[in-house]
Amino acid sequence: MLKIAATAAFIVLVSVFAVKSVGRPPAPTAAVAAQTAVTPEPASTAPAPPARNAQGRATVTLAADARGHFVANLQINNIIVRTLVDTGASAVALSAEDARRVGVFPAGADFRIPVNTANGVIRAAQVRLPEVRLNGIVVRDVEAMVMPPGRLTGTLLGMSFLRRLGGMEFAQGRLVLTQ
C-alpha cells in the first residue's frame, strides 16, 4: 500500500511539472545562448550634460516625494549616496554606513563634536569631503559630520553644501538648486 501511495505521489509531481512545461520552449544550453546572444551597442560613457539656466549655471530640479521630502543622489568619492535634503542640518550628515561606503573612516576618538539632533545630543566626527557632486553641480571641500553607527539611517544633505550654491528655489513641489 505504501509503494502505491509513493508511486501515485511521484506520478502527480511529474504530471504537474509536465503541464507547467507545456508551451514553453526548452531552456537553451550555454552553447545555444552564446550563439544567439545579442551584442548591445556600446553605451556612451559620457554623462548627460547638466541642465543650465539662462546664465549658464548648472541647475538640478528635485521633485518632492509623497511625504513632501526632497531626495537626491549625491556622488561622493565616485560612490552614489542617496540623501535627504535638510535645510535644518548645519552640515552634510553621513551615516556611519554611508561614510564607510565612500571611504571615510573616522577613528573612535574623532567622535567628539556635540551635535543636537531630534533625539538629543550625540557626538559626531567632523570630516572634509574633497568633492560632492549632485548631477552637474560640484562643490569642493565640503564640511561633513559622520554620525556614530546606528544613530542615523541615511545621509542628510545639509547647509554646508546648500549654502555654497548660487541659489535655491522652492515652488509647486519642486526644489531647484543652482550652482
Image (cartoon, rainbow, N blue to C red):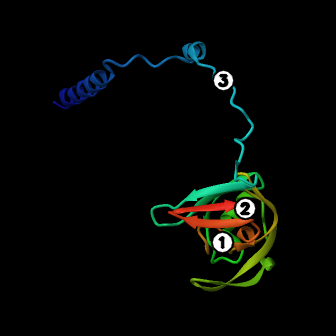
Q: Which residue is drawn at 62% across and 61% down?
A: 176
- In the displayed structure, 119 sits above or below 19; it is below
Q: Which of 7 and 110 is in front in this view?
A: 110
Q: Nearer the viewer, mark 1 or mark 3?
A: 3
Residue where numbered disc 2 is placed: 100
Secondary structure of residue under mark 1? loop
Q: Can you give x and y, in whole percent of width and height, for residue 98 in the image?
A: 68, 62
Q: Which of marks 1 and 3 is nearer the N terminus?
A: 3
Q: Which of marks 1 and 2 is nearer the N terminus?
A: 2
Residue where numbered disc 1 is placed: 149
Q: Is residue 154 in view?
A: no
Q: How many marks?
A: 3
**The residue under label 2 is which amino acid type?**
Arg
Real-space Cα distance between discs 1 and 3?
43 Å
Residue where numbered disc 3 is placed: 41
Q: Residue at x 23, y 27 (%)?
A: 12
Quarter of image, res 71? bottom right
Q: Are marks 2 and 3 in contact (CB under 8 Å)?
A: no
**The residue under label 3 is which amino acid type?**
Glu
Q: Are marks 1 and 3 in contact (CB under 8 Å)?
A: no
Q: Can you give x and y, in whole percent of width and height, for residue 158 in the image?
A: 68, 71
Secondary structure of residue under mark 3? loop
Secondary structure of residue under mark 2? helix
Left or right of 18? Residue 178 is right
Q: Can you give x and y, in whole percent of width and height, for residue 58 in the image?
A: 73, 54
